Image (tube, helix red, strand yellow):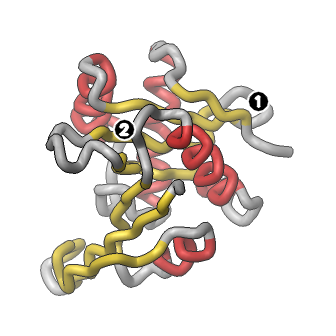
Amino acid sequence: MSLTFTLDPAVTPVLRDGILDLWADVSNAGGSVGFVPPVTAEDIRPELVKHFVAMAEGRSRLLVGLDESGAVAATAFFSFNTHRLMQHWVWLYTVMVHPRHQGRGYGRDLLAAAEDAARGFDGIDAIRLTCRGGNGLERFYGSCGYKEVGRVPGAIRVAPDDYRDDVFMLLPLG
């Protein structure tokens, strides 16, 4: 089975709650999506609201993947640059696939759908993202065509004695 991807879906209570549950489940499974376990959907809600505000203002767009039952199984948020010299590339944030779907190739499918979507954005030549070092994510993104273009050692503190690199990745679309 595969996921069905939609760019800019209508934000309904069902979608909102599905994203909150996905984000909490990914975080609690050890996913590198801005939180450290344990976390609840209510802990995440303020961050999701920020994403929705950015979407309403046209600064961000949402790509969502639904599984065969219609449940939210994957997400990625695009964020556009406002600096006039950097408007030719877009950030990809909060890239998530539900843990129950891990190992099925859905992460690759999500990144391919994000690439396809970005190719449809006027004037966008590349996708940038960051990932937390120490989890092998840079290898995964590298296998999907992204190149490591920078690294800030110890920039992410996940615990008082656990610092991780902030790894910058780039996917040229040209």
Of pointers 2 and 1, the one earlier in the residue sequence:
2
Residue located at (50% from left, 23% from top): 8
Above or below residue 164? Residue 76 is: above
Residue placed under numbered mark 1 in the picture: 69
Q: Quote the CA–CA distance across marks 2 and 1.
A: 21 Å
Residue located at (22% from left, 83% from top): 162
User: For mark 1, does the 10 Å Cα neighbourhood hold few (<14), some (14 to 19), or many (20 or more) residues?
Assistant: few
Nearer to me, 92 or 22: 92
- List x then y, in percent, for residue 142: 54, 75
Amino acid at the residue labelled 1: Ser
In this rendering, position of residue 53 left or right of residue 9? left
Quarter of image, res 135 = bottom left
- List x then y, in percent, for residue 49: 27, 28
> Does residue 98 show up?
no
Above or below residue 140? Residue 1 is: above
- List x then y, in percent, for residue 107: 63, 57
